[in-house]
Image: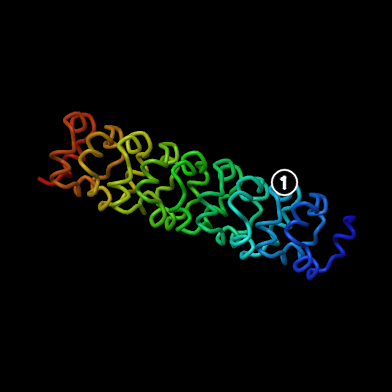
Amino acid sequence: LTTNQIQQLTTTQIAQGLTTTQIAQGLTTTQIAALETRDVAVLTSKQISEGLTTTQIAQGLTTTQIQSLTTTQVAQGLTTTQISLGLTTTQLASLTTNQIQSLTTNQVVQGLTTTQIAQGLTTTQIAAMETRDVAALTTTQIAQGLTTTQVQALTTNQVAQGLTTTQIAQGLTTTQIAAMETRDVAALTTTQVAQGLTTTQIAQGLTTTQLAGMTTNQIANLTTTQIAQGLTTTQIAQGLTTTQIVNLTTKQVAEGLTTTQIAQGLTTTQIAAMET
């Protein structure tokens, strides 16, 4: 069949006539690219999942055809293999926010590669991800996939309700931590702060601006280990506000602050602000 003949096929002929074998073994990438978007949009989930090969997807489907896929086709049709081996970063970037939100958690976790995440997903798509999908990302997908720009694109809701303590502790790199918006750091729950942030992430990741933007409740929930081994003298002197200092618990002061942190970190203003 010529491309003109392919384009003359009706949606009924496409949806009810073509078998998965005919699609997989009969249609060339050129013929796939020639399909009308209306015809692509009527393919059944079975025709997509069992018919389209990864080569046909990568080399045949145009970005316009990709965007014509319904959310049902995306969620129920595309297999994790078709996503990881079929979709190019350009095709992935063309997905609409509705299509991104229709991806199942399984498709996100087992389908998206770190390269596809880093080079394919746009900041708009990242911000549109369901919190359940953010919470399901593997630590490798986070550490090796998300760029600093993408980390900044995460919404406060995705950060506070999506990221697990394991993802924070084992997934986020110090560079990614430093790139986080101050409002997102301030949105972390006390559990995420106390059980998620490692001493290395605090010492090498948190900026003084981020530290100063943390709530007094977050500061009060830092463990003594996080204070003693995490906070640098620079972070204490330039990051902690007098209000945060005042809200340190007696235990945090007595068991957390080291003599070096007190001598070289605390300013005279901070010391004066401490509760007697």
Image coordinates of residue 91 in percent, x first then y, are 67, 50
Q: Which residue is mark 1?
A: 55
Q: Nearer the viewer, residue 121 or 139?
A: 139
Q: Nearer the viewer, residue 101 or 178?
A: 101
With respect to residue 197, does 4 lie above or below? below
Q: Nearer the viewer, residue 256 or 66?
A: 66
- Amino acid tagged 1: Thr
Q: Residue at x 54, y 42 (%)?
A: 114
Q: Relative to residue 216, is residue 66 drawn left or right?
A: right
Q: Residue at x 42, y 58 (%)?
A: 157
Q: How many marks?
A: 1
Q: Residue at x 22, y 43 (%)?
A: 223
Find numbered disc 1 in the image and state the secondary structure of the residue it sits on. Answer: helix
Q: Quadrant of the N terminus?
A: bottom right
Q: Relative to residue 241, is residue 160 drawn left or right?
A: right
The furthest residue to the left: 276
Image coordinates of residue 276 in percent, x first then y, are 9, 45
